[in-house]
Amino acid sequence: MNPKDKLLPPGQFETEKWPILHEGDVYSFQEAQWNFKLFGEVSKEINLSFQEMMKLPRTITTVDMHCVTTWSKFDTTFEGIALHELLKLVEVEPHAKYVKVYGYLNNNPFGYSANMPLEALLGDDSLFVCRWKDAYHDWQDITPKHGYPLRFIPPASFYLWKGSKWATGIEFMKEDAAGYWEQRGYSMTANPYNEERFSDPNF
Ligand SMILES: Nc1nc2c(c(=O)[nH]1)N[C@H]1C(S)=C(S)[C@@H](COP(=O)(O)O)O[C@H]1N2
Ligand SMILES: [Mo]
């Protein structure tokens, strides 16, 4: 399918570039300190080293990105570790229906977060990415500004703020709980096709 034939969500425009947006400093990767944590409603929390993470099976998926600041980028192909791969490493409690995906904000590894229902993240289009390509770029590592060494890309049914850069872990939760932007008035559900930008529709 030609990208031009795809439907833009309401209020969005298409860009071929991949803009950069985030709060705080670009995280500077140090392998010895790097850690990925699976915690919350699990029978036993685990911490993965960078080596352990990089050995996990990879998934390649093409995903559309929709940013709440109104740009949409179609058809970026990502290589990474699908969230469903990580679920094989922990025993998630059956009542855990939501997750928060965390990432660095300045020097705080859990300073940024975004909440989503777990059920929406079980497909191949929900992954922690380390490489990408598109029609204009060959395979390359995710740059530091886009979230190196590992960055979450959510399914296209969520605005891109749900895609934590410099990802550091997943918290499994019984109840939905607001992440960084959700605490600041952005939508808990964030579906671009329904234009769910803010929690309060009159915002
Ligand atoms: N750790 C972290 N991840 C983040 C952010 C951030 O400030 N910190 N910003 C989010 C927002 S608002 C957007 S739109 C996307 C932008 O991703 P990009 O810069 O790769 O396009 O990253 C998301 N992930
Ligand atoms: Mo954003």
Image (tube, grey):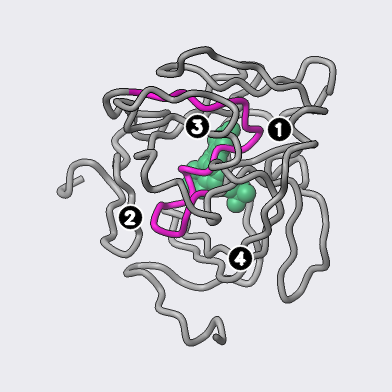
Q: Dot 4 corresponds to which residue?
A: 62
Q: Dot 1 corresponds to which residue?
A: 26
Q: Dot 2 corresponds to which residue?
A: 191
Q: Quadrant of the N terminus?
A: bottom right
| Front: mark 1 or 4 | 4
The answer to whether residue 39 is above or below residue 9 is: above
Look at the numbered disc 1 and give the secondary structure of its residue.
loop
Crowd band around label 3 with a 10 angstrom C-alpha radius: few (<14), some (14–19), many (20+)? many
Extreme-left residue of the structure: 202
Crowd band around label 4 with a 10 angstrom C-alpha radius: few (<14), some (14–19), many (20+)? some
Residue 29 screen position, x and y as percent: 80, 27
Q: Quadrant of residue 19?
A: bottom right
Q: Dot 3 corresponds to which residue?
A: 101
Do residues under tags 4 and 3 come within 8 Å of each other at their CB atoms? Answer: no
Q: Is residue 28 magenta?
A: no
Look at the numbered disc 3 and give the secondary structure of its residue.
strand
> Disc 1 or 4, which lies upstream in sequence?
1
Q: Is residue 172 magenta?
A: yes
> Disc 3 or 2, which lies upstream in sequence?
3
In space, the residues marked 4 and 3 are separated at their CA atoms by 20 Å
* Residue drawn where x is 81% and y is 50% of the image: 141
The answer to whether residue 41 is above or below residue 149 is: above
> Disc 1 or 3, which lies upstream in sequence?
1
Residue 181 screen position, x and y as percent: 40, 34
Crowd band around label 1 with a 10 angstrom C-alpha radius: few (<14), some (14–19), many (20+)? some
Residue range (magenta): 154-173
> Disc 4 or 2, which lies upstream in sequence?
4
> Would the CB of label 1 be found within 8 Å of ligand 1?
no
Extreme-top residue of the structure: 44
Q: Quadrant of the C terminus?
A: top left
* Residue drawn where x is 65% and y is 17% of the image: 47
